[in-house]
Image (cartoon, rainbow, N blue to C red):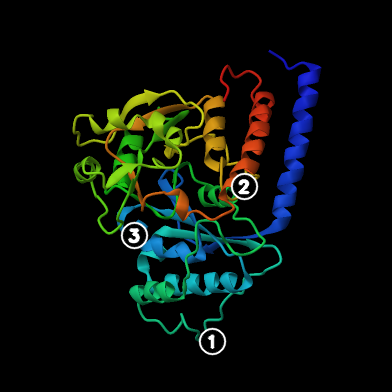
Amino acid sequence: MQMSYAIRCAFYQLLLAALMLVAMLQLLYLVYRGLLKTTMDPNDVILATHASVDNLLHLSGLLERWEGPLSVSVFAATKEEAQLATVLTYALSSHCPDMRARVAMHLVCPSRYEAAVPDPREPGEFALLRSCQEVFDKLARVAQPGINYALGTNVSYPNNLLRNLAREGANYALVIDVDMVPSEGLWRGLREMLDQSKQWAGTALVVPAFEIRRARRMPTNKNELLQLYQVGEVRPFYYGLCTPCQAPTNYSRWVNLPEETLLRPAYVVPWQDPWEPFYVAGGKVPTFDERFRQYGFNRISQACELHVAGFDFEVLNEGFLVHKGFKEALKFHPQKEAENQHNKILYRQFKQELKAKYPDSPRHC
């Protein structure tokens, strides 16, 4: 069915406004692709994540759990952080074989700052280090983790720009936050499942997400996770902040599934607002809308478009993600609620744009 003239006009007006805003966003940030490069099989499953410089400490844990390729987008909010990120990348590539073999790293910083490439002939504080562990130890001493997106600057954390950059060029990707840890063997299970069948186009394979009270005891498999779940040390992700954001995953059903050795989809879940699952998908996956920055609706909007675009959501039986620490309201920066309200208004506009973008879709958000 063809769009009417009025609908076409409305669509083009919305598209023009969106393109103008994207162009403005591109003026706000400088993007350095391939600060650290690695060879990646386009048919592989890539773990894509993003982080501020202070949170790069979590990379060591991801390298231990995820045996496949990783792609990391780093945001440097100040000139000093941009310089630190480039020196740190040089040190990691020099002393960490796993980083060289499996990690691609990209840098984003405000457009008024330029990243300075370190000169290997001039030893700096990181160039004097001699091992991968020393690099991460040094990073732990110089990093000063803040509260979520409270950057202390007048620039916004561009989470969706960073997500798009990290998954750029990938066929199948699992996009997570850097302070989450996948279950042991998840990459191998996904590779085996995807290699056995080509039927996954148009399917978002949902990886259930949890959060743990104390990050020092991260479960490796489902049995360990369920033991912690039963005593309240582990709970569904965002349980204390936005229960509906993860509730459609149907945790009660997932924890009672029979134990299996092979990773597979266990059940189908119809998408409903405001579900924001973590998932693996390939093919023509819509990008994250880069107008969403800071806190609120940045992942919900992308899941909403997946649904409207015709993707189905199927929950995996064994694999999972665990966030380090419980998400609690008091741990967020003071501007969180104002950011959420701003993005809520943008989300309403976004849903109207989807009606014009997918005029023949029977689905809506």
Residue 129 lies, in percent from the top left, at: 40, 81
Left or right of 356 in this view: 279: left
Chain-order first, disc 1 or disc 3: 3
CA gap between label 3 and label 2 equals 33 Å
Kind of residue at badge 3: Gly
The reply to whether residue 197 is visible in this rendering is: no
Give the number of the mark in front: 1 or 3: 3
The residue identified by callout 2 is: 338
Mark 1 secondary-structure assignment? loop
Label annotation for residue 61:
3
Residue 144 percent location from the top left of the image:
48, 70
Viewer-proximal residue among 148 and 338: 338
User: Which circle marks residue 122 in the picture?
Assistant: 1
**Tag 1: amino acid:** Glu
Q: Earlier in the sequence, mark 3 or mark 2?
A: 3
Q: Position of residue 271 (x, y in %)?
A: 47, 26
